[in-house]
């Protein structure tokens, strides 16, 4: 239980069940938007089209390279991410349509979630359609298919509700994952159980928190917050 609370606490702050766009300053520091890859023998910023003057438009996959690379020099990256110091010091302007503090912004998600988890390319709209929702912030077409549609069909019957079609009706059904608390929790617990996450959560220590994080998120991202919330939950629950 402490692990579950710790993970949903880090994912949602226990208040936001629908993933929001980042501010311009947050784009420069977030793990996701600092992702790098190798192109022409150099380390380059993957999501360079977030910035003015760069484009990576495309309807197909794999994820396209930008028309110009933003090269990350040696010493300015670690693992898969550029350093926040590099990001903040490169003097690039975040495109206005990528920043939206209150309404959710389709352009941002269509870029950073394109061509992964079975999502289509940037122009498909899948990045926004299958953005993070719920207590576990289920993200990507693959996870919505297996953790939402398949489980709904098993309980309520095939054809009773469609989450996967590309239509206004299906998009409203998807939004209910964030708007209906009971349904959101059911989906999150289903995701947790399907991943056999409890098998990794039989103690609370640094190693177990990292393993649970990888099971929930795919990578060990945001470990400081996940560790903080898990330990806080555990201190309360074990009394």
Image (cartoon, helix red, strand yellow):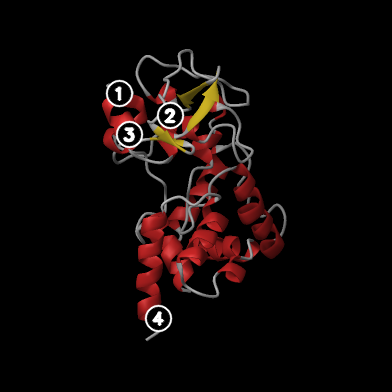
Q: CA distance from mark 1 to mark 3?
A: 10 Å
Q: CA distance from mark 2 to mark 3?
A: 17 Å
Closer to the camera in the image, 166 or 14: 14
Residue that carries the numbered disc 3 in the rendered image: 28
Q: Nearer the viewer, mark 4 or mark 2?
A: 4
Mark positioned earlier in the residue sequence (2 or 3)? 3
Q: Residues within 10 Å of mark 4 (few under 14, many from 20)?
A: few
- Residue 54 visible, this orientation: yes
Mark positioned earlier in the residue sequence (4 or 2)? 2
Spot the residue most to the bottom. 239
- In the rendered image, residue 155, in percent from the top left (x then y), is placed at 68, 65
Closer to the camera in the image, 166 or 207: 207
Q: CA distance from mark 4 to mark 3?
A: 37 Å
Image point 51% across, 66% down: which residue? Answer: 208
Mark positioned earlier in the residue sequence (4 or 3)? 3
Q: Residues within 10 Å of mark 2 (few under 14, many from 20)?
A: some
For residue 44, above or below residue 213? above
CB atoms of marks 2 and 3 within 8 Å = no
**Image quadrant where one finds the C terminus:** bottom left
- In the rendered image, residue 212, in percent from the top left (x then y), is placed at 53, 62
Residue that carries the numbered disc 2 in the rendered image: 107
Q: CA distance from mark 1 to mark 2?
A: 22 Å
Mark positioned earlier in the residue sequence (1 or 2)? 1
- In the rendered image, residue 115, in percent from the top left (x then y), is placed at 59, 32
Residue that carries the numbered disc 4 in the rendered image: 237
Residue that carries the numbered disc 1 in the rendered image: 90
For residue 122, above or below residue 188? above
* Quadrant assignment, res 69: top left
Image point 41% across, 41% down: which residue? Answer: 31
């Amino acid at each position: 239980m402490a692990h579950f609370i710790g993970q949903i606490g880090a994912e949602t702050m226990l208040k936001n069940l629908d993933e929001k766009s980042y501010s311009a300053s947050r784009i420069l520091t977030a793990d996701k938007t600092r992702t790098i890859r190798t192109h022409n023998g150099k380390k380059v910023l993957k999501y360079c089209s977030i910035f003015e003057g760069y484009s990576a438009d495309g309807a197909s996959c794999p994820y396209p390279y930008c028309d110009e690379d933003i090269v990350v020099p040696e010493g300015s990256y670690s693992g898969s991410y550029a350093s926040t110091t590099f990001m903040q010091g490169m003097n690039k302007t975040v495109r206005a349509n990528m920043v939206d503090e209150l309404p959710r912004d389709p352009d941002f998600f269509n870029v950073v979630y394109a061509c992964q988890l079975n999502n289509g390319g940037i122009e498909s709209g899948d990045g926004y359609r299958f953005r993070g929702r719920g207590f576990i912030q289920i993200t990507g077409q693959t996870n919505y298919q297996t953790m939402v549609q398949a489980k709904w069909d098993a309980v309520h019957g095939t054809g009773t509700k469609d989450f996967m079609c590309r239509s206004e009706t299906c998009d409203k059904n998807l939004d209910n994952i964030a708007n209906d608390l009971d349904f959101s929790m059911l989906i999150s617990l289903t995701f947790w159980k399907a991943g056999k996450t409890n098998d990794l959560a039989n103690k609370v220590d640094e190693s177990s928190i990292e393993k649970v994080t990888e099971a929930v998120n795919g990578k060990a991202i945001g470990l400081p917050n996940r560790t903080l919330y898990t330990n806080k939950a555990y201190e309360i629950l074990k009394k």
